[in-house]
Image (tube, helix red, strand yellow):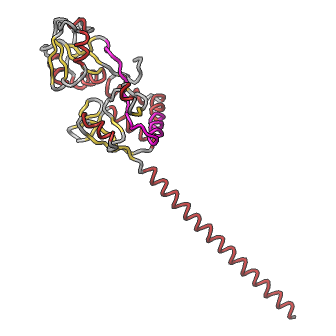
């Protein structure tokens, strides 16, 4: 009788111990699950909070400009970065500045890159990491609609050409025109030069091909391109040359590759420039 009672007590004790061990194990699993959930939440939050600060003048139509009605930035590069961020998970904050201050902001880390049709030059490539080019647009003559006589600088001898102050277009004319046979008329804005060509005050003006096409489409001025563009210059986004940015540039390039392959890059170009200027052969 005693042995039976003792055996029963031992069985009860073992059962209680098993229950305690099971509850303890469950508690540990729940705690670990809770920790794992917290880590996942933090990782998701970090991914959602990635932000790039992009600098621009905010006044370069049709690349990046301010819509006076909505007070928001619009343009080719705004649309492009909307597509890039959709693929990379970044958020974008735009910071506007005079063009002369943009590279200073980049050098001091106050912005991550510049979106303002930045030309990729050998000098800049020595200092910055560039994304793959997304626009190929160079110096383009613009003449009055119906004026097919001006196809090159040679056709401008004895005539007037408008040049926006501060641009390199004047150097192109001077390097070609050693004898000073082409009269240069300086303008504060590109728009003023376009207007004077349209009304016949001057014979031609200079712009980038992308800007010329975009402006003609927007203003509906009686203008046309004068021959083929004299130069072809790739435009891309510059980043500070450091280890941290190499992975970022790779992500941007991967996104640009996808946008080329699915036709979205060409679509955005046609929207703002009326032509696909995203390849060097176009």
Which quadrant holds the N terminus? bottom right
Furthest residue to the left? Answer: 201
State the residue at coordinates (29%, 11%): 227
| In the depicted structure, whether residue 206 falls above or below residue 19 | above
- Check if residue 244 falls in the magenta segment: yes
Furthest residue to the bottom? Answer: 1
Residue 255 visible in image:
yes
Which quadrant holds the C terminus? top left
Query: In the picture provided, is 114 more to the left or to the right than 168?
Result: right
| In the depicted structure, whether residue 13 falls above or below residue 235 | below
Measured as percent of width and height from the top left, residue 175 is found at: 25, 12
- Check if residue 213 falls in the magenta segment: no
Measured as percent of width and height from the top left, residue 31 is found at: 58, 68
Query: In the picture provided, is 10 more to the left or to the right than 194?
Result: right
Residue 58 visible in image:
no
Which quarter of the figure has residue 123? Answer: top left
Which quarter of the figure has residue 12? Answer: bottom right
Which quarter of the figure has residue 78? Answer: top left
177, 262: nearer the viewer = 177
Q: How many marks?
A: 0
State the residue at coordinates (35%, 21%): 233
Measured as percent of width and height from the top left, residue 262 is found at: 47, 30
State the residue at coordinates (35%, 18%): 232
**Magenta extent:** 228-254
31, 119: nearer the viewer = 119
Measured as percent of width and height from the top left, residue 152 is found at: 27, 9
């Amino acid at each position: 009788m005693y042995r039976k009672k003792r055996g029963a007590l031992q069985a009860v004790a073992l059962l209680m111990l098993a229950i305690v061990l099971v509850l303890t194990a469950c508690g540990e699993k729940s705690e670990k699950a809770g920790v794992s959930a917290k880590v996942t939440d933090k990782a998701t939050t970090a991914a959602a909070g990635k932000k790039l600060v992009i600098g621009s003048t905010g006044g370069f139509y049709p690349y990046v400009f301010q819509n006076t009605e909505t007070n928001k930035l619009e343009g080719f590069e705004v649309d492009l970065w909307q597509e890039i961020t959709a693929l990379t998970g970044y958020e974008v904050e735009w910071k506007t500045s005079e063009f002369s201050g943009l590279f200073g902001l980049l050098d001091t880390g106050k912005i991550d890159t510049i979106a303002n049709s930045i030309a990729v030059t050998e000098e800049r490539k020595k200092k910055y990491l560039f994304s793959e080019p997304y626009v190929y647009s160079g110096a383009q003559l613009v003449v009055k609609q119906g004026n097919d006589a001006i196809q090159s600088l040679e056709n401008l001898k004895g005539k007037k050409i408008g040049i926006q102050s501060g641009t390199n277009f004047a150097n192109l004319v001077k390097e070609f025109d050693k004898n000073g046979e082409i009269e240069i008329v300086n303008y504060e804005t590109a728009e003023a030069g376009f207007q004077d060509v349209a009304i016949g005050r001057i014979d031609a003006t200079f712009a980038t091909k992308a800007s010329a096409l975009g402006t003609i489409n927007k203003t509906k001025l009686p203008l046309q391109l004068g021959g083929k563009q004299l130069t072809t210059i790739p435009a891309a986004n510059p980043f500070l040359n450091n280890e941290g940015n190499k992975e970022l540039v790779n992500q941007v390039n991967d996104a640009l590759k996808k946008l080329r392959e699915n036709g979205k890059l060409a679509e955005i170009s046609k929207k703002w420039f009326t032509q696909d200027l995203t390849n060097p052969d176009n």
